Image (spheres, coloured by chain):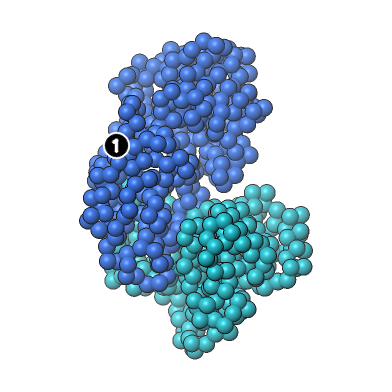
Chain colours: A cyan, B blue
Amino acid sequence: MIYDEPRFRPGGDRFLEIEFGDELKLELNFRAQGLGQALTQERIKGVIEIAPFFASALVHYDPDVITFEELKAELLRLINAVASASDVELPSRLIYMPAMYLDPWSAEAIDQYIEKINPAKERDPDFVARINGLEDAAELVRVHSGTEYWVAALGFWPGTPFMMPLDPRCRLFAPKYNPPRTFTYTGTIGMGGGATAIYPVDGPGGYQIFARTPVPIWDMQQRLAPFKEAPYLLRPTDRMKFVPCTREEFDEIHRKCAEGSYEMNVVGYQKISLQSHRAWVATLDLNARF
Amino acid sequence: MLEVIKSGLETSIQDWPGRQGYLKVGFPWSGPMDHWSFRLANVLVGNAPGAAGLECQFIGPTLRFTREAIFALTGADMQAKLDGQPLPQWESIAARAGQTLEMSFAKTGARAYLAVAGGINNDAFFGSRATFQKGGLGGIDGHAIKAGQVLPVAVGGHGRAGRRVRLDQRPVFATDKRWQIEVCAGPNDDWIDDAGQQRFLTTDWKLSSKSDRGGFRLDGPQWTFTHRAHHKPPENGSDPANIVDHGYPLGAINLAGQTPIILVNDWPDGGGFINPYTVPGCAFWKLGQSRPGETYQFRQISVATAQARAREITASCAESSIE
């Protein structure tokens, strides 16, 4: 649902959360990102930062400068001034990301989980394929890699993208692990709810996993060109396209990334508007799968 | 300069308010957990209240001064000695070049703060010197301090020895292992039913040993939910505590299934669980000084009250508190 009026909720003494709705819809993220963009153009005194998410935005403010009620009024004014989200046009780089689907590292992490934590766990690729009505893991690979992903937000850990498919025919759902997994390899690609994410570093995790990219999204050594300004690759409103690769290609790219010689494909001239996306979606047969 | 002889359990360079302004790319603020004691230590030695100093957790470090310095210790009592002589806390002290500051385990509280006149002068990363150890950034090489390192101290500090924080301006730590922690309702209190809210505010919650500078896990009873937690679009997730991934405020009581985790300084700033309550900044010194196994009782206050309390603490971190 998209709420008629955005809801403003306090998060302690310094945060305000704006909820625009409770779904994974591009329009909701456009509202959140549109507000973020408006706030960088017209500053509100006392607003320190805004972190847009899928269908909401977290605003960090200084209560010595602005009260919660004043901030709420200012934000509402700005939200109304942004007009409708369909007019918002956001710059969006397209990043091609090699990914080895049904990779041995995800399999290893899943094996470990089945052995040590939950023997009844169905293997992630088979499970995600089954609950989404797909034939098998091979079809999951085709569907998951058949769309561009919208980087709706970064968070949880520095530079970690929360992404949603832009092609509605590639929409998939996956419940999160319960209890979570204790180990996941850097670069592992997985899904939780309707979101796709990449693990920036080795660590625990709760997403269903079925692929791995050899290209870093987080690198403190900043070895590749797109990391020149910061140790993170992605920015909100970027798009990502996974390009399935073989084990040999994975190893070769992995090696080149480590030595800093990998040439990343980042396309940087496009803008995305909700209007143009909507017009395209209207031409699709939504029941089709690839 | 401070030469690290022993690192202590996890001693890190922090500044206040930390690395703010990058929530949208996922950087937590880091910074000292008990920012009240931290700021008082800086005021004692003549620094700006937020200047970089050391946070010592549970067991403090052993450090050698390579040149003379004015320093102060606040927060947990780690039985500090200078060349074997016991030292007072909450007081600025002069060290001569070559003297050794030795800290031990915390007798009261959990985190001690060391400020040195001039402030620690490591390279800032994205606007802050604070260490985010789990993320491997800030501090020196992104880690807690290590034996053998030399911590740079800015020259030109103008501290004086013998200044003390007035008794009535120091935080008073619980002596009976029980802490009353202020909380504000929201952002997702409407997901918890009346019985669940009542239960949260009347339970003695136990701080789990599975806690660190990113999150404090609490052991206690089960949660119960309102209608909306059970009836929502599938992208919210299947557990009643699941929500469409959203941003997490610092201090959020983040409900991971049935386990509440208070998100503290090195927190993951977004994800798919609800945050029914938030611990405001004014209660963070209590979080910072409590130990696993101790008990929290939560007391609900309004946002305006929490903001007023934060102002009082900030006002206390000033010259007027020094005698």
Please count the marks in the image. Answer: 1
| Along the line of sight, the residue nearer the viewer: B128 or B262 | B262
Q: Residues within 10 Å of mark 1 (few under 14, many from 20)?
A: some
Percent across and percent down for residue A93 are: 58, 68
Q: Check the picture and name the quadrant holding the N terminus of chain B.
A: top right
Residue A195 in view of the camera: yes
Q: Check the picture and name the quadrant holding the C terminus of chain B.
A: top left
In the picture, measured across the screen, residue B140 lies left or right of residue B164, that is: right
Which type of secondary structure does the marked residue at label 1 adopt?
A: strand
In the picture, measured across the screen, residue B184 lies left or right of residue A94, that is: left
Residue identified by numbered label 1? B180
Q: Quadrant of residue A217?
A: bottom right
In the picture, measured across the screen, residue B34 lies left or right of residue A191, that is: left
Q: Quadrant of residue A188?
A: bottom right
Residue lying at 47% horizontally and 60% vertically, measured from the top left = A178
Residue lying at 46% horizontally and 40% vertically, measured from the top left = B209
Label 1 resides on the chain identified as B
Residue lying at 23% horizontally and 50% vertically, measured from the top left = B198
Give the answer, above or below, for where B160 lies relative to A71: above
Percent across and percent down for residue A276 are: 48, 80
Give the answer, above or below, for where B221 lies relative to B55: below
Residue A232 in view of the camera: no
Percent across and percent down for residue B41 are: 44, 25
Percent across and percent down for residue B300 are: 25, 44
In the picture, measured across the screen, residue A243 lies left or right of residue A194, that is: right
| Along the line of sight, the residue nearer the viewer: B101 or B207 | B207
Q: Quadrant of residue A257?
A: bottom right
Give the answer, above or below, for where A127 lies relative to B40: below
Q: Amino acid at mark 1?
A: Gln
Residue lying at 55% horizontally and 19% vertically, measured from the top left = B102
